[in-house]
Image (spheres, rainbow, N blue to C red):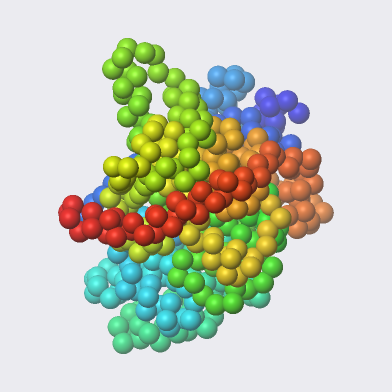
Amino acid sequence: MDPKSTIESGRAILGIEFGSTRIKAVLIDEDNKPIAQGVHDWENQLVDGLWTYSTEAIWYGLQDCYAHLRDNVRREYDIEIETLAAIGISAMMHGYMPFGADEEILVPFRTWRNTNTAKAASTLSELFVYNIPIRWSISHLYQAILNKEPHVKDITYLTTLAGYIHWQLTGEKVLGIGDASGMLPIDPDTKNYNAGMVSKFDTLIAPEHYPWTLESILPGVLVAGQEAGRLTDKGARMLDVSGHLKPGVPFCPPEGDAGTGMVATNAVLQRTGNVSAGTSSFSMIVLERELSRPYEVIDMVTTPDGSPVAMVHCNNCTSDLNAWVNLFKEYQQLLGVPVDMNEVFGKLYNSALNGDADCGGLLSYNYFSGEPVTGLSEGRPLFVRKATDKFTLANFMRANLYASVAVLKIGNDILFNQEKVEVDRITGHGGLFKTPGVGQRVLAAALNSPISVMETAGEGGAWGIALLAAYVVSNADKRSLAGWLNDCVFLGDAGTEILPDPADVAGFDRYIERYQGGLAIEHAAVDALK
């Protein structure tokens, strides 16, 4: 069908993802191609020392994003969205959203960006003999217990951002397995929370005499392909304030942005992986076997269908890089030259390719916030050089591009060099790859691996969760998620691949050696600039 007929007949599928700086909605057709979109930009707030988004901002953002989608549909096709074939909700993973008996949030949403849970994460990692990152919901919960926060006794439900929105739209307290694996470790055999760890946690907090057990407050776990509820009357009104959208639309399990990134890059099969590089960055490598031991800088999560994944998560990626590019934009405006940001990014990024492979000695630390992989609970963006270093524009931009994936390299060096993990394909997506070829080449040098970028990768996680919604309603022959993606979405699309240049690899290795040696400068900056 043509897009207008697809929408009119209710066969379009909607995916909505809440990213760190943008909420995006994508409408796809029966061939899984985007046919309309809506966006809403937003920013987290630092309130009482914690990064948060208010529930008011969450709902205003969702409704405004959907309103922009409606506007796009009316403008392009001169019709209204009345019903849909399926809906999927995705959001940034982890964090802490506890609710009481009245279904009101008990404390402001604590996002993945917060780094105040180190004591809890360390204690739980030792208790479970399993790496529990500071971002995970269980770390936030136990830290609140350690802090004697009075709200803990009143918790009746604990979920993630995606789980919260899904619950309000459908009434179902469930979560996709990928997002659930960022709350508490998953047992790969049962495809549910690790029962032994749940029991250990309940024993650990027994002296507090809370009226709940851990299992009683966590969302149910679903895998890709399962229906996860339907849009209620209340949910339809909350999503579409115009009143046109009808209830009854089926939902896929709500997922985290890591899972939707894997889907959007066709990286749910063993020996494949992807790197998402935007405000934060993370790599996801689907494993053939368990790692030999836990590593503090590697999170074990799952694909949306439950396969084990080694995840390296970095709190910082392109924010500092974008800030420097905006400085050049201001200079261009000062000269009275018209600004085209695509051109500004393209010129500056491509200039980096003319720099020295090791950036001429220059160093950049892009830490807008803390960076757990390198042991920083807070961040201070820094640019560092010696007087004798080669301070050129090309080296400056290259150093900042290297910084955007430097922490990612540190974590993945463990996987590839120590654990001897092998991958057949790594696919990149996100803002770092918008300028063709440059981000790919930098990441290929960092990971010493071929990097592919697909034309569809720019659609991002909203497209990924739309695909998961399509998988629920269109997979009549019950193919595996990987098989369905290969046959129905990515058939013949392998993307554009860039191989690592040996000189770039050697240069990045020299850069990262200086980078790790210079971390003491970053620590000193955090201590000195309060």
Is 474 on the left or on the right of 455, as rendered? right
Residue 330 versus residue 306 in the image, above or below: above
Quadrant containing the N terminus in the rendered view: top right
Is 237 on the left or on the right of 11, as rendered? left
| Image location of residue 8, percent across then percent down | 66, 28
Residue 301 versus residue 482 in the image, above or below: below
Residue 28 versus residue 108 in the image, above or below: above
From this viewpoint, which residue is outermost toward the front?
Answer: 388
- Point 39% across, 46% down: residue: 361
Residue 343 versus residue 38 in the image, above or below: above
Is there any visible trace of residue 280 in the rendered image?
A: no
| Image location of residue 72, percent across then percent down | 54, 25
- Point 73% across, 25% down: residue: 2
| Image location of residue 276, percent across then percent down | 53, 48
The front one of 418 and 179 is: 418
- Point 58% across, 57% down: residue: 284
- Point 56% across, 50% down: residue: 505
The front one of 102 and 440 is: 440
